[in-house]
Amino acid sequence: MTFDQHLRGRFKYYDVLDTFLILDTILGKTRSYAGEHFLYRSTFAEVDYGDTTLSPETSTDRDDFIFGSAVYTPYRILVEFLAQPESTFTAFVKESGEQGLAKIGFVAAGDRRVEIEVDTKKFNVISIALTTPDDLYGDVRDEFTYSDYDDFGVSDGDATFTFAGHITERKHDIIVNEVRIAHDSTPIDNVSSILPRLSKGYALHEETPKPTEIMTATKFNSEIYFLEFRQAESRVLLVNFKEYLLVAEAPLTPENGELILKKAHDLFPNKPVRYFIFGHHHPWYLGGVRSMVHDGVTILSQPMDTAYVRQLVTFPHHLRPDMLEKEPHPLILETFDSTKTITDGDLEMQVLSLGKMSKHTDDYLMYYFPKYKLLFEDDLSGSVVGKPTRPADEREKGLYEGIKKYNLDVETIAQSWPNSPDYETIFSSSKLAEKVGMMAK
Ligand SMILES: [Zn+2]
């Protein structure tokens, strides 16, 4: 098994059981990034990887650190367990005497479900499973197993301590992290840069509440609407065919999917949303797919994406239930091979595969409306407002060549992301041609 990243470092927990210091370094191919993390009771301080100054930390950052430290040691999560009022964990307690294993569990900050498996003969932690809610992937289970327990020559008078020498982290049964621990007698306090810098007044920053999404509908014409998402910086395409509506793209979350559907029903009360299509498989375009399924919308997909769509639709969302979790609805999937035309006899939408030409993803699509000489694509171009025109990059060149390949007569290009006042996301095809013309020959 090979990993993209290697990490090396040292950690120490102090006699005062709720003090914990980690110094570790991400070893990159060309350079390394040192980081330092310090926890004392409810206070957390950190110099992030590659940084030299203390970063502003919130209680969420502290909790992420505590549960992330499971990759080094189960110790800090045990401390968290011991701090729980009994009422939060009793329901989970389970003991199977024969193997001498006990399973304890509790609900922790951030809706995390924590399960700790303990060897009741040696009182070693065998495994910890953390389940956390994710908008897209649902209840994500992260499993840490601890083995090769050893005292590593550490003793304190009569007391002996044992440490797990080998830790593996698995997600979806795939090992994503593997850690080996060795004893190092060098006092790490001496090389800490964080400890001397922590003044008496050091405190966690206030949590800034997540801003609520604001979505506005822009009428391009009576048949084509753009739904503009401020927080997600995304543009969704809503197409008004004679008998039904089509939604293209739904950024990041099921909540955003619901916003789109609500707006579609408000604008066109008597028309169903029949189709949902996504320009490629990234979360900005597929994040709201579960809401579409819940609403009975047919999902249009190329064969290469159907397995992923099925996963997104079937992943359990028990911890933070969305509408599809609360009211299950079967997936209605319709596949097409690279191109598809949707028409009501007057308005025609051509779905065209750009694929590898996009220099972004193999499943890349663009949508063309001959009636309006309009092309819609997700994220291939980027022109900063107010900056002089620059030569096209590879993705822009790919888009340009795609338009040529299909012989499209395009006047206007509308892009989904990044939809912010800083970027030109509705531009003329002549601007794209100009940029391609500026490329070095
Ligand atoms: Zn993308």
Image (spheres, rainbow, N blue to C red):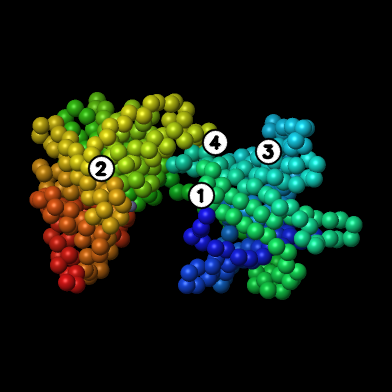
For marks 1 and 3, the one nearer the N-term is 3
For disc 1, the neighbor class at 10 Å (few under 14, some 14 to 19, many from 20) is: few
For marks 3 and 2, the one nearer the N-term is 3
Q: Is residue 216 visible?
A: no
For marks 2 and 4, the one nearer the N-term is 2
Q: Are marks 2 and 4 in contact (CB under 8 Å)?
A: no
Which residue position holds label 4?
319
Q: Amino acid at mark 1?
A: Pro
Residue drawn at the location 32% of the way across and 28% of the way down: 332
Disc 3 versus disc 2: nearer the observer:
3
Q: Indicate the position of residue 295 as horizontal and vertical percent values.
A: 35, 29
Q: Amino acid at mark 3?
A: Gly
The local secondary structure at tag 2 comes to strand
Which residue position holds label 2?
237
Q: Indicate the position of residue 357 as horizontal and vertical percent values.
A: 23, 55
Disc 4 versus disc 1: nearer the observer:
4
For marks 2 and 1, the one nearer the N-term is 1
The local secondary structure at tag 4 comes to loop
The mark found on residue 209 in the picture is: 1
Q: Indicate the position of residue 385 as horizontal and vertical percent values.
A: 26, 63
Which residue position holds label 3?
105
Ligand 1 lies under 8 Å from the Cβ of mark 4: no
Q: Are marks 4 and 1 in contact (CB under 8 Å)?
A: no
Q: Amino acid at mark 2?
A: Leu
User: CA–CA distance between discs 4 and 1?
Assistant: 20 Å
- Furthest residue to the front? 1
